[in-house]
Amino acid sequence: MKKDFTGIFRGNEKGFGFVKIEEQEDEIYISRGNTKDAIDGDEVLIKMIEVSREDKHQEGKVLKVLKHNKDTFVGVFQKSRNFGFVVPDDRKVNTDIFISKKNCGKAKNNQKVVAKITKFPQGNKSAEGKIIEILGYQDQAGVDMLSLVKEYDLPYEFPEPVIEEAMAIKQEIAKKDIPYRLDLREKEIFTIDGEDAKDLDDAVAVEKLKNGNYLLNVSIADVSYYVKENSLLDREAIVRGTSIYMLDRVIPMLPKELSNGICSLNQGEDRFAITVLMEIDQNGKVVSSDIQKSIINVTRRMSYKEVQAILNENEGSYFSHFKRMEELANILKERRKIAGSLELDIPESKIILDKHGIAVDVKKYEMYFTNELIEQFMLTANETVAEKFYWLEAPFIYRVHEVPDMEKIEELNKFLWNLGYKIKGSKDNIHPKAFAEVLEEIQGKPEERVVSNLVLRTLKIARYENENKGHFGIASKYYCHFTSPIRRYPDLFIHRIISRYLENNYQLSDEQLEKYQEQSLRYAESSSDREKIAQKVERDAEDIKKAEFMQDKIGEEYDGIISSITSFGVFVELENTVEGLIRFDDLGDEYFIYDENKKTLQSEKSKKMYKIGDSIRIRVIFADKLTRRIDFQLAVGN
């Protein structure tokens, strides 16, 4: 039996870690004394040392660090007379970086800096390094977000040749190509987005046909027309993979000359698009469809809020058109509900920043039915495109979301059992409907948000693949990302494939098929990796700003709901979406017993019980944007 394995080390701020190896689903636990100086993200060689009898988890020991993941780290510089050291922002990096006097440069005490490791830690010796960039003081405007950019090594600026290539593209459409496109410029068509949106890549229109069916037209900016295969723009887009949204700034996949210019479906301007035309019956089934290269001219740019107001008031500009959209969206939503599509009640945060980038308010992002209306149309277009190209056996990138692991479902059921719910199904027959039924049962109840979060954690993470494996979360057999080519590379790649098939009358040579098949595999993998990084950055940006917002709220009391219970404390989420931790020491003078199966906490003397979903009043006792930590204590009277 094989004893040594290679894998990626995932560190924990307490010093221990885990290693994920290809051969098995569960990660291998590595205790603090067995990490052999591995840093989060390093490729390591490990050996198994034991299996825990209690939880059957395997434990391992790092034998050797095979490859360091990175050698530059962002942190706070601490200076003494003859030397300094950098404390990394990433708490999973369990080493300070020693900086000799000659390598300190002009860095001053408590400044945020970028340090490059010149000697990695060994035994009791810390890492050694040098300061390569000074970002500014911790409380200086913009330094927090700039630190994230540097921490994740994000491509913040476009190389000059890429900008030049973008600027060389004309900002009006090429008239010579108009005859080869479906001309929809005389049709009513709308973009419906958030009020702050700048890159408008989807436009929609709904007609009622004589047979009672609906004609849904979803027109998506024809980005691949401008971003040519193998161009500098294309290569840069592959590297970036996705746009990253960091509250007050965007790191776009494409330069603004394209994303906000000729590719953006701006009101009243002729634009090239790829349009999916779908005839949909009264049951929400797509009975026929077609995909065409088109030219459109957006009738009106609308926001979700504006369209919702028109629908609520039953009058206003283009009311009849928006009413048709509402009817069709409700039909599509009902069809998804019957199929078992999951509706998770997890509110998004809206963080308000002042002109200096300081968080001045945190609240729930306001959602309207019109948000859902557009989502239903985009889902339907994505499914239609994915199914068509699946049956064509085309080289393609699918959005894949596989069936969750039975072990995780069983773990979820242990908790749900306490609330009187259960995810039904067997190991070989788990259907989205089983999850959807529970989510429907909890709607409007105090535990709704908590259960939605636990269901989300039980589900697998969606990713890109060049093989179709279905999408569990939306209960769909065929699914892809086609509707956002300005900000996601898989969508741009799919547009290129569609164009090739349309241009060649759906006949590609073996050489072309082989080339695009290889690309689909490579780009699916790289896009999945870039998406993970984007999600981490966006989550970290939110955590920093939420902690910043709470820094001057010390001593204030709020009502919240217990969102999670662990072996070290209770997490509480406030109505404004801010989450903080009540450590056991801040729960009172009593000793508490943690039940891992039921996820409950009970005091030994008074028998006071805390469980997930309970309402609770807290007092803020600590908030620090540098550590991204928010701590609460139980308010008097709980």
Image (spheres, rainbow, N blue to C red):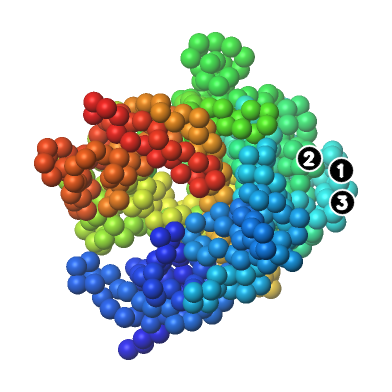
Q: Where residue 95 sits: x, y (%)?
A: 52, 65
Residue 164 - label: 3
Q: Nearer the viewer, residue 54 or 465?
A: 54
Query: What residue do we see at 44% from left, 59% from top?
Result: 13
Q: Nearer the viewer, residue 320 or 535?
A: 535
Name the quadrant of the N terminus. bottom left
Q: Residues within 10 Å of mark 3 (few under 14, many from 20)?
A: few
How many numbered marks have been drawn onto this rendered protein structure?
Answer: 3
Q: Where residue 107 sits: x, y (%)?
A: 72, 54
Mark 1 → mark 3, Cα distance in angstroms = 12 Å
Sequence-first tag of 1 and 3? 3
Task: Name above or below for residue 519 compared with residue 200.
Answer: below
Residue 83 - label: none
Query: What residue do we see at 68% from left, 24% from top?
Result: 300
Mark 1 → mark 2, Cα distance in angstroms = 8 Å
Question: Which is more foreground, mark 1 or mark 3?
Answer: 3
The outermost residue toward the front is 81
Residue 479 visible in the picture: yes
What amino acid is found at the position of numbered circle 3 in the picture?
Glu
Left or right relative to 54: residue 378:
right
What amino acid is found at the position of numbered circle 2 in the picture?
Ile
Query: What residue do we see at 86% from left, 46% from top?
Result: 167
Q: Nearer the viewer, residue 166 or 411?
A: 411
What amino acid is found at the position of numbered circle 1 in the picture?
Lys
Residue 170 - label: 1
Q: Which residue is mark 2?
A: 262
